[in-house]
Amino acid sequence: METSSEHAQHDPVNTTNGAEQQVIVKNITENNDSTNTSTGITNPTSAISTPSISVDNSNNTSNITTDSTTTSTTTNDPSNNNTATTTTTTISTVNDNVASSSNVSASNVSNAENNAEKVVFEGKVITKQNRLIALTLRNESLMWNEKGFVSIILLSTVIGVTTMDKFFTVHVIARNKKNVRTKETASFKCQSVEQAKAWADAIHNVLNQGGKGPHGCRVVFVVNPFSGTKKALSMLASVRHLFDIAGMHITVIETDRAGHAREIGRDINLATVDRLVCVSGDGLFNELINGLLEREDWENAIKLPLGIIPAGSGNGIAASLGTPNAVSAALAIIKGHMRPVDILRTTQNGKSLYGFLSLTWAMISDVDIESDKLRWMGPARFSVGALKRIISLRKYKGKITFLPAPNLPEPHPECVSFANCARCKDDHVPIPAQVREDGKRVLPNYLYDVTQPPPAEWRVIDDEFVVFIATNVAWISTDFLASLHAHLSDGAVDLVLVRAKPELTRAKMVSLLLQTDDGKYINSPLVEHYKVKALYLEPGHHSNISEHKSTEGCIIAVDGERVPYTPVGLEVFRGLINMLSIE
Ligand code: ADP
Ligand code: MG
């Protein structure tokens, strides 16, 4: 499914706090607050307007508010001869007798210095408005003061700098007024070619501090040309120039058959790649992970930063990482910020398969797999499939045995940002491999021998079910917030169940369905939710065919791909892989 807009809650906000006497520079944020930034924007792009300052005078709230005045000019970007929009947001205080905008600047500088944000480079340059300004580069920002107004570009949004003659152009991926990330540019003219180069070098040096930046980084893209509505290749083409600006070396491998990505994961020479990225749906990424984990050197392989540009039907992992479209995914790939993500291991008949998204059964897997023939519809196929399944509602017999995860669940809107999610960040310890008798290093085993009764701490639910989702991520597809409580690296899956109770009418099912896009359905008394470290599912037949006691046509899926309809064990390994995400 192609996603044209970002869910606001998908994308974390970059926040710096600081305070100084009367004027408090409360937030230097990315644009997540329309009140800060939209005033007078003729073109709602915001390379520079996106990082906005909101001013809060706690001592005298009536006197200071934020007034965001924006000048927007369409200019010729001298570095690439493309027409680009340079937008400058300037921040001023409404009441000048309390604090002028230069107070804001002074406060911010002081704040920056307090945070050891020292000046790296500074000098006079000319803006597109033909104004001579003093430009200051710090570790985290590029800042200037124009006619008394402060403008800031956060370096966390800068992907690269290009030069042409006396100009240097800063390329930014930032949120626009509609909260969608887009590429913007800001160009400055210097007094000499050398000076323009010096500025570009200085900014590049900060971007590539410690050699961790994108410059020279080797990225391998694994592209499934048949993902979703077959737009993976054009999607990659649409953002390819961003990787060029960042100075990355790109290799593209197109998959030519099912199973190809698994082979790539298994065979790729780790010494030749710095970032490995799928341009696909969740299914191809599942193959790649399985390939990496079945290698002899899997412990090294999983250190590789992994990314995804969402081009598939569901795109659950991209939505859950806060990179729901190609541009936001490109920013994550370029900036190289990594966050750990839990891995699931499912075992059926002694065979293991790894996953990162979900184990689904009953209505959810039915809809996912049965609606595959409606691919041409795009994301609507899931809703159509769900309505069909509600009309001919199936009740599945089954036994679920699970090991509850130690902590109580709590909602966590910040989980898209590893830095902001205390639950994922705290006491995060990588899983130690166990050494088998034959000397092979393997992942530990959390399951028990099913021929024995379950250990005391395991719970058993033996009943009839309509919905079964064991999800590792919040969003199992772009439109389905499966669990508001899910964390990407808490070492647990969220088990969501709907039992076939008499009060579960079709109308109530439709009502639950309508609350899946904001995840609120999980609060219904008809829905049960558990945090789970490991589980067994013993699936039975469903009501429509119960008289035959057959399970023909019944479906279990791992990461949205069909697996055999037999008992399945699931274990969670905390933060086993590292995924490229927005900081
Ligand atoms: P979607 O989200 O649309 O299902 P995926 O990228 O997840 O898209 O792909 C689904 C499956 O397509 C993968 O699991 C893989 O086995 C298969 N696949 C990959 N490359 C090809 C190809 N060239 N032709 C056919 N199938 C492929
Ligand atoms: Mg988890």
Image (cartoon, rainbow, N blue to C red):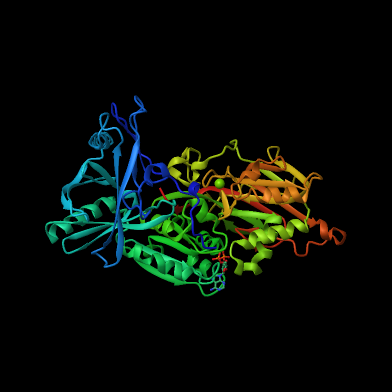
Front one among 398 and 151: 151
327, above or below 373, in the image: above
Q: Nearer the viewer, residue 464 or 407?
A: 464
Image quarter where the N terminus lies is: bottom right
Q: Residue furthest right?
A: 547
- Place residue 282 in its image quadrant: bottom right
Q: Nearer the viewer, residue 558 or 448?
A: 558
Residue 15 shows in the view: yes
Residue 97 appears left or right of 51: left
Relative to 249, say whether 421 is above or below: above
Instruction: Say left or right for 381 vs 290.
Output: right
Whole-percent x, y for residue 439 in the image: 52, 55
In the rendering, at what x and y percent does residue 372 appear? 64, 67
| Percent position of residue 415, x then y | 50, 44
Image check: 14 left or right of 480? left
Say which quarter of the image contains residue 105: top left
